[in-house]
Image (cartoon, helix red, strand yellow):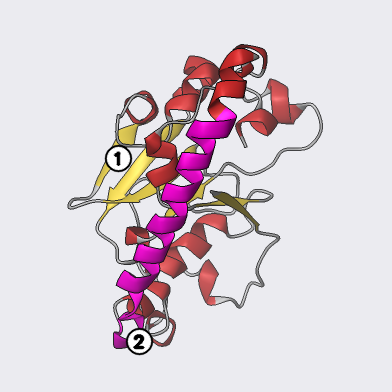
Amino acid sequence: KIYEVVVKGVSSASPLQSKTPPTSVKATTMSNWAASPRSGSADEVINKTNKVSAQLKAIYKDNILPAEKRYRYDFFYESPFLTDVEFDAKPQVMLVGQYSVGKTSFIRYMLGRDFPGARIGPEPTTDRFTCLINGPEERTIPGNALSVHPDLPFRGLERFGVSFLSRFEGSQLPSSVLRSITLVDTPGILSGEKQRVNRGYDFTKVV
């Protein structure tokens, strides 16, 4: 349930480039839409999603998991077995693209506000993976804490080591948008060998 959005860039006249979205833009942000009366069928959608998730969970446990254990899938592919947390987690939308093309600005536009840990500028500014999750208060959560949290689907990221976890953080804030999805902001894509060597972890495998 991870969806990737490739951000190629926005024009200099786009409202996404401004630090504070103008009032006319704020009126149509996704957070306002999510809180509007036309989203009243959200409970029905959630119920249907939960039913599909429960069916997929049953198929995995009854048919796929036994085969993975028999052939040691977790050892040969360095991927842990799926747990109920992964199936019950909200869909994740990951934004991927070159640096300074508007990934972080796009997230701000969707939320209609800034978020803890946001970094915006003309040069490469987002140097870490930032996972935006809904919560009662604004705060940042270290990556090593996210990877061991029993209620979050990030347990499999431990295998990328300290080099990656030091560049992974959670950004918690109250948001009507984040009640239904989890957004993931990423560092800008580098060219050639820099993509692997300069980071200290395998960017491609993490993504």
- Residue found at x 47% / y 20%: 158
For badge 2, the amino acid type reads: Arg
The quarter of the displayed image where residue 86 is located: top left
User: Which residue is identified by label 1?
Assistant: 140
Image x and y of residue 126, in percent: 52, 43
User: Where 168 falls versus 89 (above or below)?
Assistant: above
Q: Amino acid at mark 1?
A: Thr
Q: Nearer the viewer, mark 2 or mark 1?
A: 2
Tell me the SS state at disc 2.
helix
What percent of the width, then of the height, locates residue 36? Answer: 30, 83
What residue did someone put label 2 on?
38
Asked if residue 130 is among those painted magenta in the image, a careful observer would answer no
> Which numbered disc flags the more N-terminal residue, 2 or 1?
2
Would residue 179 appear left or right of 17 to someone viewing this image?
left
Over which residues does the magenta segment extend? 36-64
Residue lying at 38% horizontally and 56% vertically, measured from the top left: 50
